[in-house]
Image (cartoon, grey):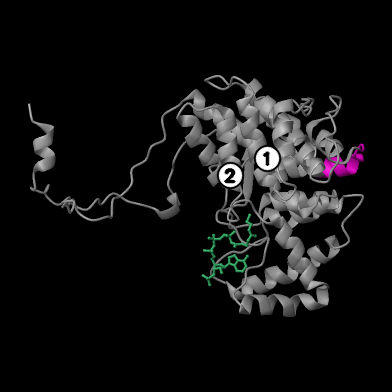
Amino acid sequence: MTDPSAATATTTLAPAQAPDERPYSPGLEGVLAGETSLSRVDGANGRLVYRGYRIGDLVEHGSYAAVANLLWTGAWDPRTRLATAGVPDAVLAVLRALPATTKPMDALRTAVSAWGATRELPWPPTVDDARALTSFSPSALAAFARLRQGKDPVPPDPSLNLVEGFLYQLTGEPADPGTARALDAYFIVGAEHGFNASTFTARVITSTRSDIASAVAGAIGTMKGPLHGGAPSEVVDQLAEVGSVDRAEAWIREALAKGERLMGFGHRVYRAYDPRAAALRKVAESMEHKPEWLQLAIEVEDVALRILKEKHPERVLQTNVEYYAAPVLQGVGLSPDLFPATFSLARHAGWTAHVLEQAADNRLIRPDVRYIGPEERDLPVG
Ligand code: COA
């Protein structure tokens, strides 16, 4: 048997390793890293389906509760109900302890983590766990939004479906049906979108047999990054700067000349009009309390698409989901700093469905990495 101390004492270096020639794709772009039956994002044709059903049809005929249930179970039942759940006292104590300046995404991530600490979460996770977490988080975010304003949290109303319940707990007033319907549509289009960074995070965490709260807390942390969380609030800011449609052409040309990007246009995967934007535009147009600048948004969109086509004839740059998420979120009266956390609430259905899918056929996700550091060498001693 070899003496291990002799091995560390030797100055003989291992032979230099041959370079690792296996293909590597930065950002894992184009790499198949799993299989799913939850959604298909067809970027070339601008199509999105959840378990085979077109996103536009789900928005028109479904509710977020029914879509979440579809993602979790595979069964379509438009009568599905899902109310918001109460916030455990221990979680409320944590939320009360946060400074009022805490970013809503940080508060939501903290709440999910604290929620996980208050219960025994089983392996494998169940549909009931997915349902419990998805119905807890809107109450937690609403509670935080009130606490930071010095108001008391509003307990859930079990007669309301999830999105209506969230709005009620935010404001303490029943939401009008048009407003609730518009936000519900936003939740449906935000529910699921393939192997994006936060979903992948949730699957990696689940693959270690960790619990569903850890997976979703990690996913929220991932979504917090500005490259992922989307920026409908930036669309709002940009339209405010444009101001009126007759200024749009000059403003857009100047912004592009400075190398800026037009918010709400372009996508890593879609090379066609984002089907979620199309569905949300319809919803925004049918809203009773339309934000004043919706008409401006519609007119500016035409100008922006024309100029983007002229500037980038080689690349299809089309409207993405954020462009019309902005009027919907603004129109239902949410403050822009709640937009990213509201997107996270919507994505709970997809994240938790991926947790269930990963757990049902689990293999630890542990890829290789190409080493590009120094060759093996002696540590300078003495
Ligand atoms: N406005 C102006 N130009 C844009 C653009 C936009 N919104 N999106 C892409 N482009 C241009 C880029 O400047 C680049 O041009 P160049 O090659 O001359 O530098 C070209 O199109 C390709 O861009 P690239 O960054 O490779 O595309 P991507 O697929 O990596 O980027 C986004 C996707 C979403 C990050 C990008 O389109 C973007 O920043 N959009 C604005 C932000 C936004 O709406 N985000 C929400 C996405 S849901």
Which residues, given as a range, are shown in magenta? 173-182
Q: Amino acid at mark 2?
A: Gly
What residue sits right under mark 1 in the picture? Answer: 108
What residue sits right under mark 2 in the picture? Answer: 221
Name which residue lies at 41% across and 54% down.
26
Name which residue lies at 59% across and 19% down.
120
Q: Amino acid at mark 1?
A: Leu
Q: Give the answer, above or below, for where 364 lies relative to 374.
A: above
Magenta stretch holds residue 175? yes
* Dot 2 crowding, Cα within 10 Å, few <14, some 14–19, many 20+: some
**On the picture, is 207 further left or further right than 189?**
left
Name which residue lies at 57% across and 72% down.
313
Q: How many marks?
A: 2
SS class, disc 1: helix
Name which residue lies at 80% across and 55% down.
327
Locate residue 217: give its quadrant: top right
Ligand 1 is found in the corner quadrant, namely bottom right
**On the picture, is 305 further left or further right than 19?**
right
Locate residue 87: give its quadrant: top right
Percent position of residue 39, x then y: 59, 38
SS class, disc 2: helix
Q: Residue furthest front?
A: 382
Q: Give the answer, above or below, for where 130 lies relative to 23.
A: above
